Image (tube, rainbow, N blue to C red):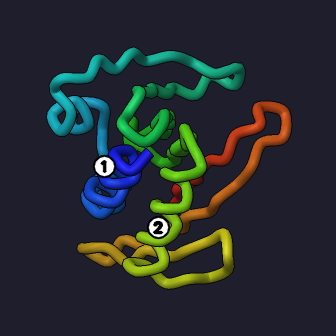
């Protein structure tokens, strides 16, 4: 347990900035993570998306139909320890809007809204990222 907590606390600061990939194309995402295989899939409405298993959960990226850039993403958390560590880091780095939402002011004037949500059906917490 101590080892897991150490890994979470050590890597979360690096993941907070790294995980916000809104505006990137698939090729740019692949350049950032060359060791991961990204498979494009389509949801029921025909929207392209890709996902991969990261150290702190599953990351799902949705692409705009016209620009082919990531315009929405979610991060499904694997465990409560990672969830709490991520929330703590968001509270340090971003503007707190509520207990479950933040606003990130990034380079080049980009503003990202982050929300912590819970899916009762899946019994899973996840972060939603949108411009």
Q: Residue at x 50, y 36 (%)?
A: 62
Please tell me how many numbered marks the rendered image carries: 2
Q: Residue furthest front?
A: 2
Of residues 122 and 30, the one nearer the viewer is: 122
Task: State which tag comes first along the sequence, 2 or 1.
Answer: 1
- Give the residue furthest to the right: 121
Please tell me which residue is depicted at 51% across the width and 16% down the height of the picture: 41
Q: Please, is residue 113 above or below residue 34 in the view?
A: below
- Rendered residue at 49%/84% (across/down): 95
Q: Element under label 2? A: strand
The residue carrying pointer 2 sits among few (fewer than 14), some (14 to 19) or many (20 or more) residues within 10 Å by Cα, namely some
Question: What element does badge 1 sit on?
Answer: helix
User: Which numbered dot is residue 59?
Assistant: none
The spot of residue 111 in percent (x, y) is 43, 73
Find residue 26 and report its horizontal and vertical position in percent.
30, 31
Image quarter where the N terminus lies is: top left
Q: In the drawing, does residue 85 fall left or right of residue 36? A: right
The residue that mark 2 highlights is 112
Question: Splitting the image into 4 quarters, where does residue 11 fall?
Answer: bottom left
Local crowd at mark 1 within 10 Å, few (<14), some, or many (≥20)?
Answer: few
Query: Residue 7 — which label?
Result: 1
- Residue 23 appears in the picture as rendered: no
Q: Quadrant of residue 55?
A: top left
List x then y, in percent, for residue 17: 30, 61
User: Is residue 30 in view?
Assistant: yes
Left or right: 17, with 117 as reference point: left
Marks 2,1: beta carbons within 8 A: no
Picture coordinates of residue 20 (x, y %)?
A: 37, 55
């Amino acid at each position: 347990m101590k080892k897991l907590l150490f890994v979470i606390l050590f890597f979360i600061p690096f993941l907070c900035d790294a995980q916000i990939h809104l505006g990137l194309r698939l090729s740019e995402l692949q350049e950032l993570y060359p060791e991961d295989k990204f498979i494009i899939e389509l949801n029921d409405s025909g929207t392209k998306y890709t996902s991969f298993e990261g150290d702190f959960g599953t990351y799902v990226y949705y692409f705009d139909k016209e620009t082919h850039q990531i315009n929405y993403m979610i991060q499904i958390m694997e465990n409560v320890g990672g969830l709490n560590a991520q929330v703590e880091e968001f509270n340090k780095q971003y503007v707190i809007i509520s207990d479950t939402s933040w606003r990130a002011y990034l380079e080049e004037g980009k503003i990202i809204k982050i929300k912590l949500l819970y899916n009762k059906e899946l019994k899973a917490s996840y972060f939603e990222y949108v411009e």
